[in-house]
Image (cartoon, rainbow, N blue to C red):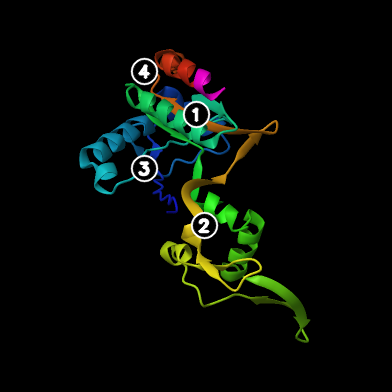
Amino acid sequence: MYPYVGYISLELYKMKPQNFVDRYITPYLSFYYDETGRIREISSKEISAKLRSFLKKQKYKERFNLTNLMVVENSMGHTKADIHIGIISSDHKKALKAIREIETAFATLKGLKYYGDNVKVGTDEIKLTINSYGEELGITQKYLGNYVSNLYLSKKVGTLFDGNELLEIKIKSINYEDNLESLKNLEIPLKNSHATIRLKDVCDFTKTKSLERLIKDDGETTFYVFANVNASILTASEALNKIMPVLKEIEQNTM
């Protein structure tokens, strides 16, 4: 399945003047001051809290089976998150497991506005591995890959000029259904023989999650978990201290 992301942007009215400086000093000293639309009486922080409470009460995340549901506030500066935790591992499965463990730990903390990660999961992939029977029949990964790709993927065979521009000529077989069961029952011709055998008899099928995007820092693949805190309840340092046992365990298991 593809991961889909939807969002609703809210543009708030400007805040009413809150003090003497806002009312009488700023309007005369700022070249960019605009008094129109200054009718909002509560802060964006309060509005965000109300929205989070509303979404939680409505149980939208559970009702619509959402992976995540959060209210994100625009912030000043280059760093938009109070906490950034990087996971570096050559094993993607271990890295993803570590991220989920950190997010589970974040979920137990009171005082976090929201948390998330930079993992972009792509479509499911099917990995074909030749079993011992297939090896006995002389089927190799290269032979299998070439045969299957020629059937299911389009192939460029040349180019032609139509008087205006160059056009690529591609061919693709239309005799094969694009579904897993059809792939499993695909007849593979054996080398040096007129006989065929079904793909599922000579291959093991493994379904894996692919990653749509990888972030590399200094040549190493890095995954990030981030979080923003409500400083009146919890600081970033306190949050990290609370989940430190989880982080230490992850460090031991991912090295």
Picture disc at residue 67:
3
The Cα atoms of the two marked residues, 4 and 3, are separated by 28 Å
- Closer to the chain start, of discs 4 and 3, is 3
Q: Which residue is mark 2?
A: 202
Picture disc at residue 232:
4
What crowding class fits label 3: few (fewer than 14 Cα within 10 Å), some (14-19), or many (20 or more)? few
Badge 4 element: loop
Picture disc at residue 81:
1
Span colored in magenta: 251-255
The Cα atoms of the two marked residues, 1 and 2, are separated by 50 Å
Q: Check if mark 1's residue and mark 2's residue have beta carbons within 8 Å.
A: no
The Cα atoms of the two marked residues, 4 and 2, are separated by 62 Å
Q: Could you tell me residue 47's position as x and y percent?
A: 32, 35
Q: Could you tell me residue 55's position as x and y percent?
A: 27, 40
Q: Amino acid at mark 1?
A: Ala
Badge 2 element: helix
- Closer to the chain start, of discs 3 and 2, is 3
Decide if residue 75 is in sight here: no
Decide if residue 7 is in sight here: yes
Residue toward you, 235 or 66: 66
To which quarter of the image does residue 11 belong?
top left
Picture disc at residue 190:
none
Q: Could you tell me residue 69's position as x and y percent?
A: 35, 41
What crowding class fits label 4: few (fewer than 14 Cα within 10 Å), some (14-19), or many (20 or more)? few
Point out the residue furthest to the left here.
57
The Cα atoms of the two marked residues, 1 and 4, are separated by 16 Å
